Image (tube, rainbow, N blue to C red):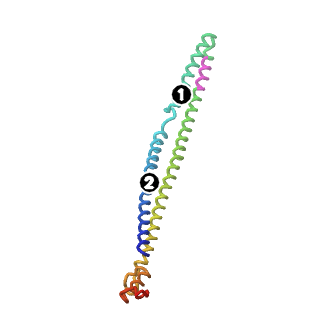
Amino acid sequence: MNPVTIGLSAAGLLANLFGQYKAGQATESQNKLVNGQIADLTSWYDTQKNQPYVDSNVGKSVIERALETFKQQAKNAESTAAVTGSSDEAQIAVKGNAQNALGDVFSKIAAYGTQRQDDVENKYRSNLGQLLYTKMGLQQQKAQGASNLAGNAASFMSGLAPLLVKDNGGDMMFNSSQKAANKIMDSSGDASNYFGLG
């Protein structure tokens, strides 16, 4: 290999090193972003997973409406009994029906609470899976970059190997053409004689 080829190979290796360094920085930056997203997602999940549905805005609203409806039905039953003169048993039956309806509402709220916890769990697992898949991709990019760098360094070193091989006399041999030129110069002291120029 001549010095120009060595220089170009070295420049190529340095450019590759710089490119790998910049790619590594970008990958690390993306990795930090993904780690932050995982932390945010986990924080959200921790606050949501154990929150009772009745404490949520929707749960509170449903309970308030159910209680208001129950109170209104109880007042209507009393008003109707006063106007029509219905018996106490009839009033109790109407209020009992309202209480049954209220019980059904609370049963549904409990079912919604279970469904909500399942939904939170599913969203968390789905989003976490996507983020971990992204993180795996970043790790693969990092590994591929290291592999490329090692391959390029190995290619550069294998290109330098012939320059560092010793000849039979124990001298370092640069390459066959350099060795031939050295022998010509050593035998006569002037290479022009060898080429018929002298």
Residue positioned 56% across, 38% down in the render? 115
Q: Residues within 10 Å of mark 1 (few under 14, many from 20)?
A: some
Q: Provide the residue designation for mark 1.
A: 63
Q: On residue 53, which mark appears?
A: none
**Vertical side of 158 occupied by 167: above or below:** below
Q: Provide the residue designation for mark 2.
A: 26
Q: Position of residue 68 (x, y in %)?
A: 54, 22
| Mark 1, secondary structure of its residue | helix
Specify whether residue 79 is painted magenta. Answer: no
Quadrant the C terminus occupies? bottom left
Specify whether residue 100 is painted magenta. Answer: yes
Residues drawn in magenta: 91-101
Q: What kind of residue is marked 1?
A: Ile
Q: Residues within 10 Å of mark 2 (few under 14, many from 20)?
A: some
Magenta span: helix, strand or loop, mainly? helix
Q: What kind of residue is marked 2?
A: Ala
Q: Nearer the viewer, residue 136 or 109?
A: 136
**Vertical side of 2 occupied by 141: above or below:** above
Residue positioned 42% across, 71% down in the render? 4
**Vertical side of 60 occupied by 180: above or below:** below
Residue 72 vs residue 4: left or right? right
Q: Position of residue 88 (x, y in %)?
A: 60, 15
Q: Nearer the viewer, residue 91 or 57?
A: 57
